Amino acid sequence: MSLQMDISFVCECGELVEDIVYVQDPDFSAEKNKDSQTDTWQEIYCVSCDKEHIIQVTNTFYGAMASGNYGDMEVSYGMPYFPDDEQEELSWVIDSKDQLEIFKAQISSVESLLALDLDADLKFNLLVMLYGHVVAAVEAYLSSTFIHCVTNSEALVRKLVETDPTFSKRTFTLKEIFEERESIKITVANYLKDLIFHDLKKVKPMYRDVLNYDFGDISWLFKAVQVRHHCAHRAGYDKSGNKVDLSSEIIRGLVEKSVELVEKLDVRAKEVEFDNTLPF
Ligand SMILES: [Zn+2]
């Protein structure tokens, strides 16, 4: 995936030309900033007079810039950013029925990795990674299953709007309402994805209110999310600098609970999927 950047310039005919150019990565193998420079030249045509302009995009470790017509033309430019592939990813989550298979595939290699004979430091790093991996797999399953179930049922979208305080406050633009159904699905999916990924605590009430599903006590999962946070952001150390308590047994216990949670929930998810007329 390549970075892109918004640019604009005033053509000699007076037209303000706005466009998007691609930004090549700097040379990451360079040791000094000045050696990291990469340049690309792209042709941008004026929409009014059709004149061709050459836009040079220069990128270094310090940042990207753009200039025009070999220095003869001033070009305004913004920060480089990744193109929005989110829509594609969300469509996939909405349509896919393979959430359980994906979860199982993600979990399947954990046991064989735990069996590896490694020295203590390496083993700890592996445990840190596996812990984060298992929690992420559960989160992805919970989020994608919820999104899949809800976006494919008008009744459940309505239920969500009625029961979720944030969602009910969100007003849809006329454009969103009158656009085809697929784009409303995307809007709902995007909202849910942001919401769930940033706050797992919301998952429990949402599953309860919208899918009529009670997880029971999942305090172990909330605790695991916190531990994962230490794992991901402090390389396995908590705020006070203590090593997080991790062992093969702890990972196996986490896997076991996760599989149980996911398999039980999947039964309910399949019911919802095959019969949207179930009384909720
Ligand atoms: Zn022009």
Image (cartoon, rainbow, N blue to C red):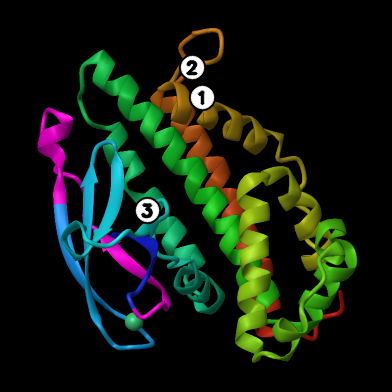
Along the polypeptide, which appears first: circle 2 or circle 1? 1
Towards the viewer: 192 or 201:
192
Q: Specify few, some or many for label 3: CA neighbours under 10 Å numbering under 14, 14-19, or 20 or more.
A: many
Q: Is mark 2 within 8 Å of ligand 1?
A: no
Q: In which quarter of the image is ligand 1?
A: bottom left
Q: Is residue 29 visible?
A: no
Towards the viewer: 176 or 142:
176
Q: Identify the amino acid type marked 1.
A: His
- Which residue: 52% across, 36% down? 254
Q: Which mark, by number, is residue 80?
A: 3
Identify the element where label 2 is drawn.
loop
Q: To which residue does mark 2 refer? A: 244
Q: To which residue does mark 1 refer? A: 230
> On the rendered image, what quadrant is the C terminus found in?
bottom right
Along the polypeptide, which appears first: circle 3 or circle 2? 3
Identify the element where label 1 is drawn.
helix
Towards the viewer: 137 or 230:
230
Q: Give the range drawn in magenta.
A: 13-38
- The alpha-carbon separation of the residues under discs 2 and 1 comes to 8 Å
Q: Identify the amino acid type marked 3.
A: Pro
Along the polypeptide, which appears first: circle 1 or circle 3? 3
From the top left corner, tell me how far across and down residue 224 is, in percent.
58, 32
- The alpha-carbon separation of the residues under discs 3 and 2 comes to 37 Å
Tag nearer the camera, 3 or 2: 3
Lateral position of residue 180 relative to residue 24, left or right = right
- The alpha-carbon separation of the residues under discs 1 and 3 comes to 30 Å
Residue 131 vertical placement versus 142 (above, below): above
